[in-house]
Image (cartoon, rainbow, N blue to C red):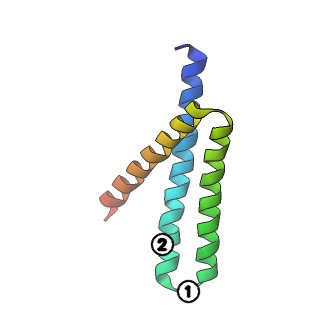
Amino acid sequence: MSFSLATTWALWLLFGLIGGTCHFTMLRWNTTLYLSGAGMLRALAVQVLRMAATAGLLFFAVWHGPVALLVAAIGVLLARTLILRAAAGAS
């Protein structure tokens, strides 16, 4: 594995981690909006934005090849684990 290949994989992993962190942070915010009952239109808008951003991230990764998609998806899953652990520790 060359240095540039390892760097590329690390950047895709970071890209997935950032995207996943945004996705799951917005999911928490979105859940709060839905449970509050006020501003359902705002909650729906946040949900659409969250899904579109995550889909955009993954489509961008697909455009760069299957390895980029796989590494970015692993980053999203790692972000999910980190967010869940942080939420469990906060309660």
Q: Which labelled disc corresponds to residue 38?
A: 1
**What residue is at 57 percent from the left and 15 percent from the top?**
3
Identify the amino acid type marked 2.
Thr
Q: Which labelled disc corresponds to residue 31?
A: 2
Choose top left, top right, bottom left or bottom right for residue 67: top right
How far across and how far down the image is residue 60, in percent?
67, 42
- Indicate which disc, 1 or 2, sits on the residue closer to the N terminus: 2
Choose top left, top right, bottom left or bottom right for residue 90: bottom left
Identify the amino acid type marked 1.
Ala
**What residue is at 57 percent from the left and 38 percent from the top?**
69
Question: Which residue ends up furthest to the bottom in the rendered image?
Answer: 38
How far across and how far down the image is residue 9, in percent?
55, 28
How far across and how far down the image is residue 63, in percent?
68, 38
Circle 2 crowding by C-alpha within 10 Å: few under 14, some 14–19, many from 20: few
Helix, strand or loop status at disc 2: helix
Helix, strand or loop status at disc 1: loop
**What residue is at 61 percent from the left and 46 percent from the top?**
58
- Rounded to the nearest angstrom, the CA distance separating label 1 from label 2 is 12 Å
Q: Which labelled disc corresponds to residue 77?
A: none
Q: Is residue 74 left or right of residue 11?
A: left
Choose top left, top right, bottom left or bottom right for residue 53: bottom right
